[in-house]
Image (cartoon, grey):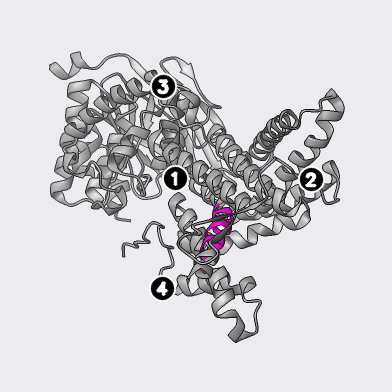
Amino acid sequence: MALERKIGDVVLDVRGISLAFGGVKALTDISFDVREHEIRAIIGPNGAGKSSMLNCINGVYMPQHGEIAFRGRSFNHMNSRQVAEMGLARTFQNLALFKGMSVLDNIMAGRNLKMKCNLFQQAIRWGAAEREECAQREQVERIIDFLEIEPYRKTPVGRLSYGLQKRVDLGRALAMEPTLLLLDEPMAGMNVEEKQDMSRFILDLNDEFGTTIVLIEHDMGVVMDISDRVVVLDYGRKIGDGSPGEVRLNPDVITAYLGTTH
Amino acid sequence: MGFFLETLFGGLMSGMLYSLVALGFVLIYKASGVFNFAQGAMVLFAALAMARFYEWIPRWLGLDSKLLANLLAFGAAVGVMMAVAWLIERLCLRHLVNQPHITLLMATLGVSYFLEGFGQLLFGSDIYKIDVGMPKDPVIVLDRLFQGGLLINQEDLYAALIAAALVAALTLFFQKTATGRALRAVADDHQAAQSIGIPLGRIWIIVWSVAGFVALVAGVIWGSKLGVQFSLSLIALKALPVVILGGLTSVPGAIVGGLIIGVGEKLSEIYIGPMLGGGIEIWFAYVLALVFLLVRPQGLFGEKIIDRV
């Protein structure tokens, strides 16, 4: 059982998260964990609270109740930047790329936290700043190779196709060398071929770099194929948790996705 | 021909100064996606600080070197503008992250009125002079080529050179440094920029400080020509057509836009003005900008607006 051995300890522990916007309850008492090196999916019908969950982990929303711990460190009151510093990177459901900038610049921007030179060194291109830029560039080129977007290096992202933009979004997150990667509907709006490409990138990432991945997805088929474990949300509550096989047989999940006959 | 060239040069030089103010708009727009109404007020505030420190510092320290007093006053004014940038971020922008642009726009409008009032409260509301020792006498060049040569105002020439150098430096900074890249990233998408660990607050302080510095340079140059007074905050209105023409997101656009407006103004005043009874310099820029909006709404160098349907 290669899979069992690969997966390590709990890295992300979500305990009893509740989030409400005014009177609207987005999430109610959600708990689950993510283990090292695994691909963990969060699925659910529209409006189930998947993106809210991700935004809580990412520090965009602050849940009213509950606790999220990353490697044993709880971070309820951190902003996005602090979360980024801890090694969590994310992609966005509705692309949030820097549209006016080239592919290269977008991904280079992802290495912002790795840049140590100060403003004045950069301004006069002092030796250290120059070397740093080159070293970072090398890393970024590896990511560009990995995602097979070499021909578009200098193209402004706004001009690329949707599928390619999604890849750049992934590339920018990878540039942070994250220990945990959050993917918000990485395959939304893609055609079959693009979905296959994206699935391959996700699996390769997990395989080659051992990146732990939490992904939100709508498309049950893809999720069942690539994830190790799946959390199912519906109306802000957790209705299922387990391996794809277990989840598929869970009656609550079937009801949520297919409806019941009354 | 000589007269035409003289007018042209005059236009180019005043255009360079418009560019300088427009540059302030572009910088802030690029980095925070907000159209900064307070740019004009910042020019006034910076110039007032410079003019007053130039009076106060020699008195406090008992200096009588003009150069030293100017340098110290300039340094103090830079400090004041950085403090202003810091305060704007702390008290205003920080609380408006991820808000719609119109909210930020209204906030800068508020900042603008506040700075105008507070500046005059702090530094007084008389007319002050700034004298950084720029040579005032006009020079005559190319007198072998033309009858009587070309009369060029030295002060304008220096001002244009300073502005050009500043612009070149800022362009390089934006395009070639990691911080410049972070600034552009923040301009495109706040949330995405935060998610990759770009510190929004620090970026904003940097960019408002740079814009404050540009405002100070513009204020000093205009102030030494016309004196520092309330009307200085109105030159920002002159810069509006410039940014429309050049594109809100382009540093080179601000420059070229400024030059076109400057030259267009002067030439039209001389050659078309008499037919319309004169005084068209005042509104020519706006008409030009309006025509431009119809043909190229994103401006000369602005990013092309592509809407995927």
Q: Mark 4 points at which residue?
A: B295
Q: Is mark 1 on a helix, strand or loop?
A: loop
Foreground mark, 3 or 1, reads: 3
Q: Do labels 3 and 1 share a chain?
A: no
Report the amino acid beneath label 1.
Asp
Q: Does the magenta stretch include residue B170?
A: no
Res. A126 mark: 3
Foreground mark, 1 or 4, reads: 4
Q: Are marks 4 and 2 on the same chain?
A: yes
Residue B95 percent coordinates (x, y): 63, 41
B231 displayed left or right of A257: right
Residue B233 percent coordinates (x, y): 71, 55
Task: Give the camera-side residue of B252 and A103.
Answer: B252
As displayed, is residue B288 above or below residue A132? below
The answer to whether residue A52 shows anywhere in this view is no
Q: Mark 1 points at which residue?
A: B189
Task: Give the camera-side residue of B163 and A257.
Answer: B163
Task: Give the camera-side residue of A42 and B225.
Answer: B225
Query: How far is disc 3 from disc 4 in space, using C-alphas?
Result: 44 Å
Report the amino acid beneath label 2.
Gly
- Residue stretch in magenta: B8-19
Instruction: Tell me the chain of label 3.
Output: A
A236 displayed left or right of A207: right
- Quadrant placement of the N terminus of chain A: top left
Density class for disc 4 (Cα within 10 Å; few <14, some 14-19, many ≥20) is few
